[in-house]
Image (spheres, rainbow, N blue to C red):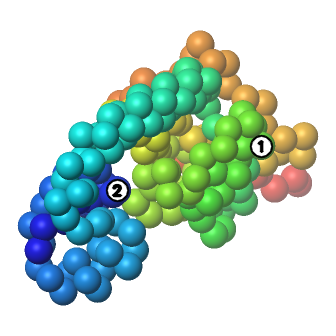
Amino acid sequence: MKVILTEDVEKLGELNQVVEVADGYARNYLLPRSLAMPATKSAMANLDNLKAISDRRQARLKGEAETVVAQLEGKILVMAARVGAGGKLFGSISASDIAEQLKAQFGLEIDRRQIGLNEPIRQAGLHGVPLKLHREVQPQIVVQVGDAPPGGFAPLASDAAPAESAVQAEPAVQAEPAEAAV
């Protein structure tokens, strides 16, 4: 069955692409979820109009994504968490937590699904986290995770942003054992 995709479908195709799929896949998955529409004669005739509308929408979305990247340029997202021995966190930091902190610290509304975190952060230190804002705009933000002092974190200077190669899951500071008072 030929269908026209109404959204990007991973491992199948992009928006407004005509693809051939199995009848059951189209009937039971693509069509009920509005991911595609049947490639009828009228839909095929209207395809050029749909592509023009889609191109304008994608250009607007790309512009919005570039604006977000400009706002995040050189900034570090600071997240407070309880840290145990060896820099391991009590609990973890998920994509939802990062989305909330982006809104709180920078006023940016980014959906948790746009944060490309493969698994939750469970280690203190600096972490590079990719964002999926647009298919052509996919920046990486730096997330600093560590113990929260009583007054909170003092953000790092934006001009001293770490290089991408330095962004690893390493503990920020190792605590030294306290000496017993005699």
Tell me which residue sits at (29%, 66%) in the image.
37
The amino acid marked with disc number 1 is Ala
- Residue 7's disc number: 2
Element assignment for label 2? loop
Q: Tell me if residue 128 can be seen.
A: no
Q: Earlier in the sequence, mark 1 or mark 2?
A: 2
Q: Residue 47, image x and y in percent?
A: 24, 47
The local secondary structure at tag 1 comes to helix
The kind of residue on which mark 2 rests is Glu
* Neighbour tally class for label 1: few under 14, some 14-19, many 20 plus, Cα within 10 Å: few
* Disc sitting over residue 104 in the figure: 1
- Give left or right: position of 85 versus 50: right
Q: Of residues 173 and 9, which is closer to you in this image? A: 9
User: Which residue is pictured at 48% across the width and 30% down the height?
Assistant: 60
| Residue 132 in the image: above or below residue 26 | above
Looking at the rendered image, the disc whose residue lies closer to the viewer, 1 or 2, is 2
The percent coordinates of residue 129 (x first, y second) are 47, 44
Residue at left offset 23%, top offset 68%:
38
Q: Which quadrant of the figure has residue 118?
A: bottom left
Point out the image quarter for the C terminus.
Answer: bottom right
Asked whether 101 or 108 is in front, the reply is: 108
The quadrant of the rendering that contains the N terminus is bottom left
